[in-house]
Image (cartoon, helix red, strand yellow):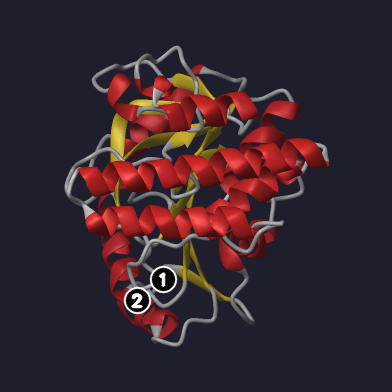
């Protein structure tokens, strides 16, 4: 049995759209929405339009991982389809493909789909590999874009497009994934060291440490609008959260080296976007670089 879990904060319209898609693509699934103390009437709107959906209202904004953990004790599905409210289930194959991957591989505890933006382009961050000094250098040098065998920070989705076999990764995006409830409970729930971002990286690490596999399914996709609860502006919080996740198990000198790689690499990306005539992207990369240099 699949149970759908949606976490939302002030994304009423997007959440209602997603619930309509869930009703069509997974009509037999139970649905729980965790409303992180929204101020836009999300909970009331859901109850009025989808009375069969269970709404859990958090006492305050618990963050994404915290919202999932808030619901976890009351969930009963064998498989949990966890979805951020700014995701669209545009591909009817998503649910059967993801559930099929778990059925075919008992060692796999979690699987995520391909993730594209509203323009249809593959997004960065659908899945990837543990941040190490080597993977960071391969990412920022561009070497990881040359071959699917070269592992940088992120899985290069385009290199796997069109394939029907799942790909083993270290982590999958928290935007949308299917996970065995028993595995998540055994971990004590979602890692919630950060309020937002990198919870997926930590989740993948803990699942693998427990002996599970984490897979990416390139043959099903969701659309991710991103920044739904942040007014649409990309946040630099991911930089701090990623560096924090790396720092969990590394000595101070390695942490400083990683910080330098991120800062210099993001500045280099800024310069490249400026040369390409994309000043808005260049400014975004500079903002990320400043976040890296400020990290401590």
Q: Does 209 sit left or right of 99 as displayed?
A: right
| x 46%, y 16%: residue | 150
| x 70%, y 50%: residue | 189
Q: Quadrant of residue 21?
A: bottom left
In terms of depth relative to the viewer, which is nearer, 26 or 186? 186
Q: Position of residue 229 (x, y in %)?
A: 41, 71
Tell me the element at label 2: helix
Query: Does residue 30 appear anywhere in the picture?
Result: no
Report the quarter where the C terminus lies. bottom right
Q: Quadrant of residue 237?
A: bottom right
Tag 2 residue? 12
Q: Position of residue 146 (x, y in %)?
A: 34, 17
Tell me the element at label 1: loop
Q: Which mark is residue 85?
A: none
Tag 1 residue? 229
Q: Position of residue 33 (x, y in %)?
A: 48, 66
From this view, report whether residue 58 is shown above or below residue 27: below
Q: Does 41 sit left or right of 152 as displayed?
A: left
Query: Does residue 135 appear anywhere in the picture?
Result: yes
Neighbours of disc 1 within 10 Å: few (<14), some (14-19), many (20+): some
From this view, report whether residue 87 is shown above or below residue 147: below
Real-space Cα separation, disc 1 to disc 2, in angstroms: 10 Å
| x 60%, y 55%: residue | 293
In terms of depth relative to the viewer, which is nearer, 185 or 270? 270
């Amino acid at each position: 049995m699949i149970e759908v879990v949606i976490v939302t904060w002030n994304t009423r319209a997007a959440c209602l759209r997603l619930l309509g898609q869930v009703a069509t693509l997974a009509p037999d699934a139970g649905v729980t929405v965790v409303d992180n103390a929204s101020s836009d009437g999300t909970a009331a709107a859901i109850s009025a339009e989808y009375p069969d959906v269970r709404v859990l209202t958090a006492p305050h904004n618990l963050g994404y991982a915290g919202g999932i953990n808030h619901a976890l004790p009351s969930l009963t599905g064998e498989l949990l389809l966890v979805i951020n409210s700014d995701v669209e289930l545009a591909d009817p194959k998503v649910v059967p493909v993801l559930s099929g991957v778990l059925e075919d591989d008992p060692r796999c505890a979690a699987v995520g789909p391909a993730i594209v933006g509203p323009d249809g382009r593959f997004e960065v961050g659908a899945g990837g590999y543990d941040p190490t000094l080597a993977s960071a250098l391969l990412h920022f040098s561009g070497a990881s874009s040359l071959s699917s065998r070269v592992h940088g920070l992120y899985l290069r989705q385009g290199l796997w497009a069109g394939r029907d076999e799942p790909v083993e990764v270290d982590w999958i995006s928290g935007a949308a994934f299917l996970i065995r409830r028993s595995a998540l409970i055994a971990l004590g729930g979602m890692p919630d060291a950060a309020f937002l971002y990198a919870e997926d990286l930590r989740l993948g690490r803990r699942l693998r440490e427990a002996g599970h596999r984490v897979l990416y399914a390139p043959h099903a996709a969701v659309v991710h609008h991103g920044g739904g609860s942040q007014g649409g502006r990309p946040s630099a919080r991911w930089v701090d959260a990623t560096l924090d996740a790396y720092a969990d198990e590394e000595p101070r000198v390695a942490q400083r080296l990683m910080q330098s790689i991120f800062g210099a690499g993001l500045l280099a990306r800024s310069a490249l976007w400026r040369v390409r005539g994309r000043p808005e992207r260049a400014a975004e990369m500079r903002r990320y670089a400043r976040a890296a240099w400020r990290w401590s």
